Each structure stands twice: as structure tokens, then as C-alpha cells.
Image (spheres, coloured by chain):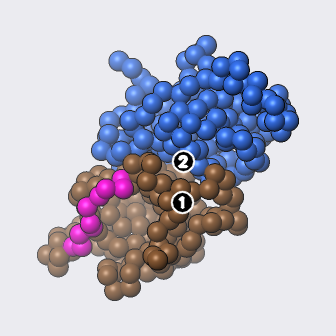
Chain colours: A blue, B brown
Amino acid sequence: MDDTLPPIFPRTFRPAIGECRWDGVAEHAYKEDGSAPFRSITRQTLFGDPRLACELRYFEIAPGGYSTLERHAHVHAVVILRGHGMCLVGQAVCPVRSQDLISIPPMAWHQFRAAVDAPLGFLCMVDHARDRPQLPSEDELESLRRDPVIASFLSS
Amino acid sequence: MDDTLPPIFPRTFRPAIGECRWDGVAEHAYKEDGSAPFRSITRQTLFGDPRLACELRYFEIAPGGYSTLERHAHVHAVVILRGHGMCLVGQAVCPVRSQDLISIPPMAWHQFRAAVDAPLGFLCMVDHARDRPQLPSEDELESLRRDPVIASFLSS
């Protein structure tokens, strides 16, 4: 049995147990090791209820960690819950902190990076039915790095 | 033009401006006055993007206020963001506070009540396509009030 699957029908009440941990919600690795570049992230599926058309996940990046630089046709709706860091979406790099909202449009390259001295935790709403993320080719990475702000973000 | 509609495509970055208020997100009344019983609630649609199958709304109930007691076939996925209070879901009454998760199953009577000394603010994820809420009949209310815990909750 795949223990990464959330319970089909979540319990009615699931209390928070400590900051950004929940009773009855398993904490998982962000992705399978070696499947894509990333550092120091965990993933918790807060709502994976098949009676809803979307899922709500919580990701937490430890200080100095980052999510995979990727793009896909589906949209992400993000609410920062904890800490602060930086975020690349398309050609824009922006500082983000608790409660900020980020909308990631289709096929925009995006990556989240926690500050060196703080975690970055965020909710991400996403359709159940969605395409797989794409990783940048060497040419695409080189093209992104031509922008000095993006180059600095990617090497931070 | 109906200013209760969110922008079709939200801006990429929308920073928080104060606690549970956001740049570019309008604050609205919870429902139309007189359409159903409620007290002291505001509603902000954080993500109403039609490219996602769900919406993410933020509701805030002022101290002593409450949401409408209602039920519907669609499911609600709730994350408490601020304050504390009590919540009825089906036959269960439970205290809720920041970061707690609540899943409201189909056709369960439900109501949120803020504490007298604190607001109760929460995110609610819901399908774009959904049925309209139903209000309890006098008979249904009487049946709910037969449970002393629910009676006490409803009159608090």
C-alpha cells in the first residue's frame, strides 16, 4: 500500500500539533530522491479529498533550501504560512513572507528559496488532474541566467 | 460591473498588508443582508482563478459573530488562520484555533462561531461548481437542539 496517499475521506477535525504539523497528516519527502534537483523540503497533504477538484498541500523548505526549478501547464495558488524567502515566477524574482499570495501561471518557470536564517512554509492549491512538471534544458537555464537578477537568485 | 468578482487572472505576487488583508483582494460582506442568518463576517476571495477547479476564500468572523447554519452537497476544506472559536459539523461540536483543519462532508449541518474575545479567521477551499446552501427548517432546528451540546452551541 502506498503510504504517500492521503486518507480518502479526511477526519472532520484534525488539530494542529505544533507549528505547521497536523494530527493525522503524514510528513513526506518533497519528491523522490534523484528525480529532480531540490534541497531540504517536506510535503504534507492537508486535503486530498477526491470529492473536491483540488488538493491543498503544505510544503516547508528548511533554511537555505529550495524547491525544484520547473514549469507545467497547470496553475499553482500559493499562500505563504511561515517564515520568509524569495520566489522566482517567470521573469520576476520577489521576496515573500508569511501570508503573501503567489499565483503561478501556466508554463512559468518557478522556484521557491528559503532564507538562510528562516524556513519558508506555504500552502499550495492545485487541481487533482494535472500535467507533470518539466525541468529546464541547459539552453533554457542559460537563457534564464542571462538576467542578472535571476542568475543571482539561482545561485543564492 | 460586479466588483464582487475576483480578477480573472490574479497578479503573480500579492503581498499581505496587515494581518489577513491582502493587496489587490477586496473585502466583501459574507452574504447579501437578509439572505440567511449570520453575524459579523467578511469574505475575501484569495484565488478565484478559472484555470483552477477550486476557489480559495478567507472568511473572518468578528468576536461574538457566527456563520450561517447550513448544509450542502459540496465539501468544504477549512484551515483556521487566525484566532479561535467553536465549530459544529454534523453532530459534533469542537473548539478550533489557528492552523486546525476541518473537513465538512456532504449534507452535514455546519456553523462557525468566533469566541467572544477573539476573531475567527479561516481559509475555505471549495469547488467552483457547487450547489447552493440549504437552511434548516424549524423541524430540523428542533431536532438539532435535542442534543444539549448542540443546543448550547447554537445559543452561545
**Is most of the magenta stretch helix, strand or loop?**
loop
Q: Which residues are magenta?
A: B127-136
**Crowd around label 2: few <14 · some 14–19 · many ≥20 (10 Å):** many
Residue B46: assigned label: 1
**Crowd around label 1: few <14 · some 14–19 · many ≥20 (10 Å):** many
Which residue is drawn at the image coordinates 77% and 48% (left, top)? Answer: A95
Which residue is drawn at the image coordinates 21% and 73% (left, top)? Answer: B136
Q: Is residue A21 visible?
A: no
Residue B62 rendering spot, x and y as whole percentages: 53, 76
Residue B8 rendering spot, x and y as whole percentages: 50, 59
| Position above or below: B112 against A44 | below
Residue projecting furthest to the top:
A34
Residue A123 rendering spot, x and y as whole percentages: 56, 45
Labels 2 & 1 near each other (Cβ < 8 A) = yes
Residue type highlighted by circle 2: Ala
Q: B61 or A144: which is nearer to us? A: A144
- In the picture, measured across the screen, residue B144 lies left or right of residue B155, that is left
Which residue is drawn at the image coordinates 65% and 36% (left, top)? Answer: A110
Mark 2 belongs to which subunit?
A: A
Residue A77: assigned label: 2
Q: Is residue B22 visible?
A: yes
Which residue is drawn at the image coordinates 61% and 23% (left, top)? Answer: A135
Mark 1 belongs to which subunit?
A: B
Residue type highlighted by circle 1: Leu
Q: CA distance from mark 2 to mark 1?
A: 9 Å
Q: Is residue B83 magenta?
A: no
Residue projecting furthest to the bottom:
B34
Quadrant of the rendered image containing residue B128: bottom left
